[in-house]
Amino acid sequence: MSALPRALPHFLAAGEALTDLLTAGAGAWHSQPGGSTWNVARAMARLGVASAFAGAVSSDVFGDELVAASAAAGLDSRFLQQVPRAPLLAIVHALHPPRYFFIGENSADLHFNAGQLPEGWQGAAQWVHFGGISLAREPLAGKLRSLAERLKAQGVRISYDPNFRSLMDQRYDATLRHMAGLADVIKVSEEDLCGLFRHADAGQAFQQLREMNPGAAYLYTLGERGARLHTPEGYWEAAAPSITVADTVGAGDASIAGLLFSLIQRPAGDGGAHLRFAVGAGAAACLAPGATPPALATVDQLAATVACVQRLRT
C-alpha cells in the first residue's frame, strides 16, 4: 500500500538559504548552513508547526548540505529548489563584532521560481514569512514582493523581518515601505532600525516604520533588555529571562518564529502571552551555539519566567 501524500504546510518562509563561511583563525575556515528566512522555517518546524522553506539553492556540495539540513529539520522538501547555479555565500571574516560580505552574483537563490511550488500550496498556507537579504537582491526581490502581494490579496497573513544588512542602502527604501505595508506582523531590532533609516535614533526610526503601517503588530527586540510587542491598542513590554548565553546567533529568527507559533497555535492568548513566548524562544536560541532551533518544552519553560507588563498607550 502506497503512503498517503504529505499534507501541505500551514507555514512558509520564502527567501534565502545560504552558506556561512566563518573564519577559524589565520588561513582556516568552516562552513555552516544559514540564512534568516531559512532559520525561521527551521525554528517553526522544531516548535511543531508544519513548515517549509520556499527558495532555491545550488546543486553542488553547498546546496546538498542545505537540502540535507532542511530534511533533518523536518521542512517540506517540495518547496526547496536546486538549480545548477553558484551558491550564495556569506564570508564572515571577523566574529566580534561580525564583519562579512556576500558572494552571489547570478547565484542559485536568484533563480527561485514560485510557479514550481506544489499545486494548492496557497490554499493551505496560513502565514508566509519574508525578509532577509532576499528582498535586497534582484531579481529575487521582485519575485518575492509580487508573491507577497498575491498572498495578501488571497487572505494569507504576512510576517516580515527586514533583518538589516549592509547591502540595504537607500535602494531598499521602496521595498521596506512596500513590505511593511503588506505585513500583519513586523519584527525589528534597534540595530535594524538604525541601519534601515540611516541614523542613530532608534526611537524615531521606529515611529517612522510604524507610520508605514499603523495597523500592524510590531515585535521590537531589545537584546538582553527583552522585547516589546506593539499593537494599535497599546503595547506589552517583557524582560529577558536570566540565562547563560552560548551565543546570540539566530536569536532574532527564533523570536519571530516564537511569536508566529503562539499566534497560530495559541490564538486565545493575549499580547502578553504571545510576547512572553517570543522572548522565551529568542532566549532559548541563545543556549546553544549557532542558529540552533529551540525545542517547545525549553521555550515554554523560559517563557514561564518572563516578566511582562501591558502599557495602554503606544
Image: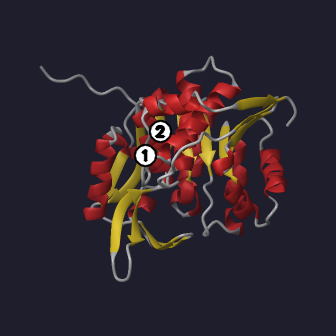
Judged from this view, the residue extending furthest toward the right is 313
Question: Looking at the rendering, which quadrant does residue 174 occupy?
Answer: bottom right
Q: How crowded is mark 2: few (under 14 residues within 10 Å), some or many (20 or more)?
A: many
**Quarter of the image with the C terminus in it:** top right
For numbered disc 2, what is the local secondary structure? strand
Judged from this view, the residue extending furthest toward the top is 268
Vertical comparison of 61 with 234: above or below: below
Q: Residues within 10 Å of mark 1 (few under 14, many from 20)?
A: many
Q: 78 left or right of 125?
A: left
Q: x, y (%) of residue 93?
A: 46, 76
Q: Is residue 156 visible?
A: no
Judged from this view, the residue extending furthest toward the bottom is 26
Q: Nearer the viewer, residue 275 or 103?
A: 275
Q: Mark 2 points at which residue?
A: 12
For numbered disc 1, what is the local secondary structure? strand
- Residue type marked 2: Leu
Q: x, y (%) of residue 267?
A: 60, 20
Vertical comparison of 190 with 258: above or below: below
Instruction: Identify which residue is drawn at 39% across, 41% down.
Output: 117
- Residue type marked 1: Ala
Q: Mark 1 points at which residue?
A: 54
Give yes or no for contact between labels 2 and 1 (Cβ–Cβ under 8 Å).
yes
Q: 110 left or right of 278?
A: left
Instruction: Identify which residue is drawn at 67% across, 57% down.
Output: 192
